[in-house]
Image: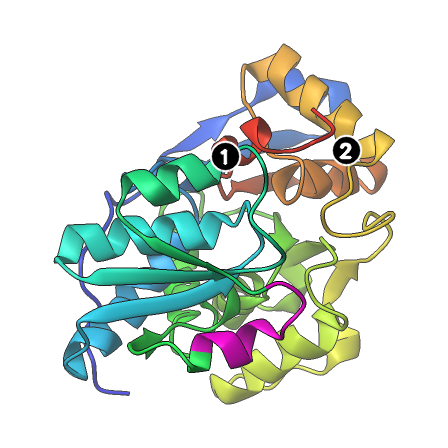
């Protein structure tokens, strides 16, 4: 696709050492790639993808961005922020019914001027398709937007050329797909968050569409931290949140980065490990178990 991404963030994001957390986890060396500091709308990994999808929307003459997600979706928040930055309207189709109290990301969605459509039990993609505007897929993920994490991998190899493993939460799959496309499956360890029924198959399909075929069995994806479901907080994740905060002053979120750290804690690799901090701080203030 011959479309140049637009600039929505601040690059490169920092790569910071985390020596106290590294010691606590028994790692040789641990670094945090601070994609929570991408600069737009509270930060997060979705900004890299939105640079591609928003460029595509503008190329097609869109005046409204439409996307879907859970009530505390970080992607929805950042789509609303990107639309505001670009002078576009934004419609967010969110799962379920309107909650009695507005918290976390929902506050920021409204501050950015997004119109929220509550889908109830209806399929999100069907409700989104009925809205006028350019529809950005779930999680902002496509083979095109995953190129944003090819960009990130190039940043990482410039910052830490001899990195051994990148640890990343796997939601809609695009972040991991982009990293694997650039670094190969042996250097990327994903932790499934339960956002999709088949994370391994989804990442493999994205890679195939990117022209980088990788067999699903070659992908390193830990599916043991989903627990009771995507929106449910598990004890290992609660412990991981506390550990990161109390050793490094780093705040993770209960759905994505908390699960990724729980996975890293359970299966620590050797060498220089990079933890991709994909953001999500506002979700802490909207999670019912916190």
> Residue 270 location in percent, x, y?
73, 41
> Residue 112 location in percent, x, y?
27, 44
Q: Is residue 151 visible?
A: no
How many other residues sit within 10 Å of disc 1, few (<14), some (14-19) or many (≥20)?
Answer: few
As for residue 244 lying within the magenta part, the answer is no
The residue shown at (38%, 78%) is 144
The residue shown at (58%, 68%) is 184
Instruction: Give how far apart the Cα atoms at labels 1 and 2 are.
Output: 24 Å
Quadrant assignment, res 208: bottom right
Q: Is residue 269 above or below residue 177?
A: above
> Magenta part of the protein: which range?
120-128
Image-based side of 53 in relation to 260, left or right = left
The residue shown at (30%, 77%) is 134
Q: Which residue is mark 1?
A: 102
Q: Is residue 142 above or below residue 162?
A: below
Which quadrant of the figure contains the C terminus? top right
Quadrant assignment, res 200: bottom right
As for residue 123 lying within the magenta part, the answer is yes
Q: Secondary structure at mark 2?
A: helix
Q: Which mark is residue 261?
A: none
Instruction: Kindly check if marks 1 and 2 are in contact, taking CB atoms under 8 A apart as contact.
Output: no
Of residue 119 and residue 171, the one placed in the foreground of this image is 119
Q: Is residue 286 above or below residue 56?
A: above
Q: Which residue is mark 2?
A: 237
């Amino acid at each position: 696709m011959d479309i140049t991404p637009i600039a929505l963030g601040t690059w490169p994001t920092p790569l910071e050492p985390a020596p106290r957390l590294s010691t606590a986890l028994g790692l040789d060396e641990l670094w945090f790639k601070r994609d929570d500091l991408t600069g737009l709308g509270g930060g997060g990994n979705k900004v890299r993808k939105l640079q591609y999808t928003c460029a595509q929307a503008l190329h097609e003459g869109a005046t409204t961005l439409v996307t879907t997600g859970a009530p505390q979706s970080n992607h929805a928040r950042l789509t609303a922020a990107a639309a505001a930055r670009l002078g576009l309207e934004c419609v967010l189709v969110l799962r379920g019914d309107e909650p009695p109290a507005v918290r976390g990301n929902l506050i920021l969605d409204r501050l950015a001027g997004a119109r929220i459509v509550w889908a109830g039990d209806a399929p999100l993609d069907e409700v989104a398709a009925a809205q006028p505007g350019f529809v950005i897929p779930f999680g902002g993920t496509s083979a095109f937007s995953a190129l944003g994490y090819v960009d990130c991998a190039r940043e990482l190899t410039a910052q830490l050329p001899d990195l051994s493993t990148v640890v990343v939460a796997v939601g809609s799959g695009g972040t991991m797909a982009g990293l694997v496309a650039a670094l190969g499956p042996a250097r990327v360890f994903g932790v499934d968050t339960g956002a999709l029924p088949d994370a391994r198959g989804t990442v493999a399909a994205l890679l195939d569409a990117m022209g980088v075929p990788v067999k699903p069995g070659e992908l390193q994806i830990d599916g043991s931290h989903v627990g009771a479901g995507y929106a449910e907080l598990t004890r290992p994740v609660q412990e991981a949140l506390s550990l990161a905060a109390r050793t490094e002053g780093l705040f993770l979120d209960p759905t994505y980065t908390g699960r990724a750290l729980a996975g890293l804690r359970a299966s620590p690799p050797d060498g220089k490990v990079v933890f991709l901090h994909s953001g999500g701080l506002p979700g802490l203030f909207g999670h019912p178990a916190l």
